[in-house]
Amino acid sequence: MENYNERYARHYALSDFGFEGQQKLLQTKVLVIGAGGLGCPVLQYLAAAGVGTIGIVEQDRISLSNLQRQTLYSTDDVGKMKTDVASLKLKLLNPEININSYQLELTSENAWDLITEYEIIVDCTDNFATRYLINDACVLLDKPLIFGAIYKYEGQVAVFNLNLKNNKAVNYRNLFPDPPKPDEVQNCNEVGVLGVLPGIIGMMQANEVIKLITGVGEVLDGRLLTFNMLTYENFIMDVSNENSAVHLIPQDRKAFEETNYDFLCGISKINLEDLNPDNFIKQTFNENTLTIDVREVDELPKADFKHIQIPLSELKSRVSEIEKEKIILFCQSGKRSLKAAGILLEHFGNQKKISHLKGGITGLQERKNEQSN
C-alpha cells in the first residue's frame, strides 16, 4: 500500500476506517483552545491518531495543582508554559504531524484570524466568556465546534454548528442563550473535580473530532451528552434550534471584534485593578489598605496574611464596615472577588480604589510553589 505507515496499522485494519480514514485525519487542521484538564487528553489522542495539524491556544503556566488531572505534564514541568511543554511532548509522541502553539489569551480581537486557519475547533476552556466568544466566532465563520465541560463528578459533550441533519445548525446559544453571572456557577478551583473526569470527557471530545473527520459512526450533532462518573448514568438531549439565538450573535466580523465578552458575562473591570500574586502580597502590607476575603468562612486554604473576612453573600449588608480608601478583594479563583468588586463599585463609585487578586488564592499558592522550586 502506497504511503503505508506502521504507526497507524490498527487504524488501517479498522472496517469503515482504513487507509482512507487515516488520510483524512492527516489532511485536517484542528484547533484546541485550552491545554488544561480537557485539553490534555484531546491533544494527546488527536496527536496519536495522526491529525495532520494541531493548534494549541493557552496562556497559563503549569502549576502543581494541575497535575492531579492534566497528565500531559509532570512535576518537573511546574512553572513552565503549557504551550511549550505540550508542543514538545506531542512532537515526541508523533513527530510526523504539525504542532502550532499560541501562547495567548483568546479575545475577540485575535480569535477571528486564528480560528479561520482551522477546519474544526475544540473548546476545552473553563470560563463562560471564552465559551461564548468561541461559539460566536464559529457560527460566523461556519466552523464545527466540539464542546466539552466538567463540573465536580459530571461532564458534558456536544457538537455544535455542524449542519449534518438539516440547514439549521445548532449552536451553544441555543442551549444557553444568555451567560450566567460570575457568582452563579463555580469552577473546579472552587468546588473541585475528580481527576479522571476531564480525562473521560476529553477523550469523548477527541472521539467526536475523529468521527467527524473520518465519517465513522454518528457524531453528537446538535445533541448534548451528559455523563455522571459516579453512577455511569448518561443521557443524550437534543438541542432545539427553535429557540433562535441569531439575534444574540454579532452580525459580522466588525461587530464581533467590538464585543466585550467579559462584560456580557458580568465581568466588569472598569475602575478595577487586577493584581498578580507578587503585587497583591506587596499591597497587603500597606497600612492604608483593607484586604477582604469574600469566601465563605469554612473554605480552605486559610489566608496567612493580614485580612478580614466578609463573605460575598453578606457584602451588601456589611459595606458600612469598609472604611479605608484602598480595598483589595480575594476569593478562591478570582470570580467572586470580581462580583464583590462590582458591588463595591456600585456602592462607593470612585470614592475608593478597589482591586482584586487575579486567579484568587489558588493562583497565589501556585506562585509560591513556583518560587520554592
Image (spheres, rainbow, N blue to C red):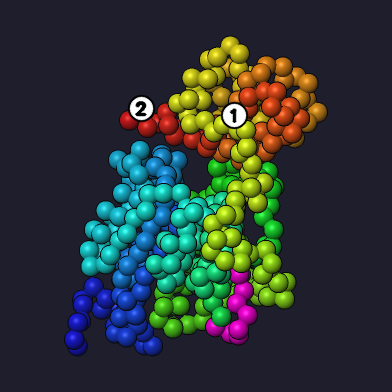
| Residue drawn at the location 59% of the way across and 29% of the way down | 355
- Residue furthest to the right in view is 317
Pointer 1 residue: 355
**Among numbered discs 1 and 2, the one appearing first in the sequence:** 1
Is residue 325 positioned above or below 157 on the image?
Answer: above
328 magenta-colored: no
Is residue 361 positioned above or below 246 on the image?
Answer: above
* Residue placed most toward the observer, 133 or 70: 133
| Residue drawn at the location 60% of the way across and 85% of the way down | 166
| Left or right: 102 as drawn, with respect to 88 | right
Quarter placement of the N terminus: bottom left
Distance from the alpha carbon under mark 1 to that under mark 2: 26 Å
| Residue drawn at the location 63% of the way across and 27% of the way down | 354
Percent across and percent down for residue 292 are 64, 24
Magenta span: chief secondary structure: loop
Q: Give the magenta range.
A: 164-171
| Left or right: 6 as drawn, with respect to 294 | left
Secondary structure, mark 2, is helix
Label for residue 78? Answer: none
Please indicate, yes or no, whether residue 259 appears anywhere in the rendered image: yes
Secondary structure, mark 1, is strand
Query: For the residue marked with disc 2, what is the amino acid?
Result: Ser
Pointer 1 with pointer 2, Cβ within 8 A:
no
- Near mark 1 (Cα within 10 A), the count class, few <14, some 14-19 or many ≥20, is many
Residue 318 occupies quadrant: top right
Query: For the residue marked with disc 1, what is the amino acid?
Result: Ser
How many numbered dots are placed on residues in this image? 2
Residue 173 occupies quadrant: bottom right
Pointer 2 residue: 372
